[in-house]
Amino acid sequence: MQWAEGLTTMLGVYGAAGAVFAALFLWKGVAHVDAGARGAGIGFRAVIAAGCVALWPLLAAKWVRR
Amino acid sequence: MSVTYAAVQWNRQKKLYDSVIAGGVALYLGRFVGVGAMVHPQATAETLLIRGLGTAAFLLLHVVLSIGPLTRLDRRFLPLLYNRRHLGVTMFTLALGHGVFSLVQFHALGDVPPLVSLLTAPARFEQLGLAALTILFLMAATSHDFWLKLLTPPGWKRLHMLVYLAYALLVAHVSLGALQSERNPLFVGVVLTGACVVLGLHVAAWGAGRGYVEVCEVERIGENRAVLLKLGDEKIAVFRHGGKVSAISNVCAHQGGPLSEGKIVDGCVTCPWHGYQYLPETGASPPPFTEKVAVYETKVEGGKVLVSRCAKTSSI
Ligand code: HEM
Ligand code: FES
């Protein structure tokens, strides 16, 4: 029971951090990480948004390295 | 060599493909709930919807998994492969609906938070469903070309190979869940048949793909030049360079130029039309470019060049 509560809390924190990160990343970062995203529209951002929330540490690492 | 991303690169064929998917799903769900309500008048609408969404997703997963081997066995199935990602995302959406409705229906009424209740439920089959749904989510979320490039094609492919784990988890989810409560031999038969079809097609495609075809004598290919090999509708450019033989798709990733009519310049196959380049061993454009064409295994036996019938890496 306790492990499940811990796990869901961790998931919630990870997801919330991811949501904040994704908003920033889709606004500023994405064009730095991939030139193909420069000038891409809101539709493109919407389609990759869920992945940005889920895989945010990976994207953060790529963004920092630029 | 790249263009700006769009949300979806629409064209007429993809729209047709998607209309067929949407129409098929709507028809299936309508029939399922309609017939279900007649056969089980005591069943609630939520229950019917949960079952309809779950079975629709599971059925679509069989289609998704069968398309790969089917196109390898017979190229007439290629149009199905063309927009398989949309099929996958549709399948995930249905599965998500099934999972969320189940969570609300069976886990949202107690004092415990729904997800905690699901994770600690004594009947394990729902946790298997959750694990599968997590995999399907990662696949759907990374289906755009942006992710293909970010994760690199081999990394992306590795992630998407998890679909087989998801399938195994779901067979267990259904076998330990619905098949236990229903105890209907017909359902057991349907699930078993589905698994046999998926497995059988993969084994058959693997067997058919192992063969090589003879192209010509090595000497017939000029140094740094290619000959064209036609395998059904597929065109393959077979190059000789520095004592080695490599085979890549004849179709340039730029605008379909005939690579076999180009030659190897500075170690790269160079398209005769606009000069896009590919490494003969990997089919990949040299960095920083990211274009890629399919590669085929080759070998030389008794002075003859042999090329595998099946691409080693497909351009996704
Ligand atoms: C959070 C994830 C999931 C939960 C909580 C969940 C829950 C359930 C429940 C409660 C049942 C009814 C079992 C019974 O009648 O005894 C069920 C059945 C089923 N599930 Fe899931 N499931 C999940 C994910 C999935 C996924 C991802 C798929 C397929 C892509 C799937 C496919 C099915 C199928 C085919 C059935 C049998 C038909 C039915 O009774 O609905 N489930 N699931
Ligand atoms: S078609 Fe333009 S470079 Fe090959």
Image (tube, rainbow, N blue to C red):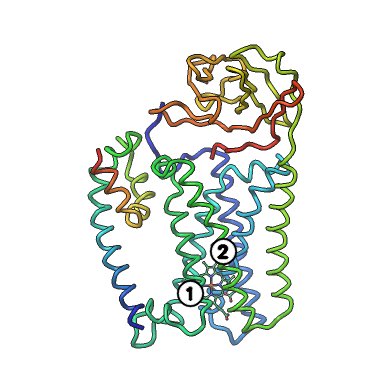
Q: Are marks 2 and 1 in contact (CB under 8 Å)?
A: no
- Residue B91, horizontal then vertical, whole percent: 54, 59
Residue at coordinates 51% horizontally, 79% vertically from top-left? B124
| Foreground pick, B272 / B156 | B156
Give the mark toward the camera: 2 or 1. 1
B152 above or below B271? below
Q: Quadrant of ligand 1?
A: bottom right
Residue B127's label in the rendered image is 1
The foreground one among B309 and B44 is B309
Q: Position of residue B175 (x, y in %)?
A: 62, 75
Disc 1 secondary structure class:
helix
Q: Residue at x 49, y 40 (%)?
A: B10
- Whether residue B127 is situated above or below residue B273 in the rendered picture: below
Q: Chain of mark 1?
A: B
How far apart marks 2 and 1 lie (CA) works out to 17 Å
The image quarter containing residue B32 is bottom right
Determine which residue is flagged by label 2.
B57
At label 1, the amino acid type is Gln
- Residue B243 at x, y percent in the picture: 61, 18
Going by the picture, which residue comes out furthest to the top? Answer: B222
Per the image, label 2 sits on a secondary structure element best described as: helix
Tell me the residue at 44%/45% (across/down).
B144
Quarter location, residue B305: top right
Asked whether the residues under marks 2 and 1 belong to the same chain, the reply is: yes
On-image quarter of the N terminus of chain B: top left
Q: For the residue carrying disc 1, how many other residues have a C-alpha within 10 Å: few (<14), some (14-19), or many (20+)?
A: some
Which mark, residue A38?
A: none
- Residue B182 is left or right of residue A36, and the answer is right
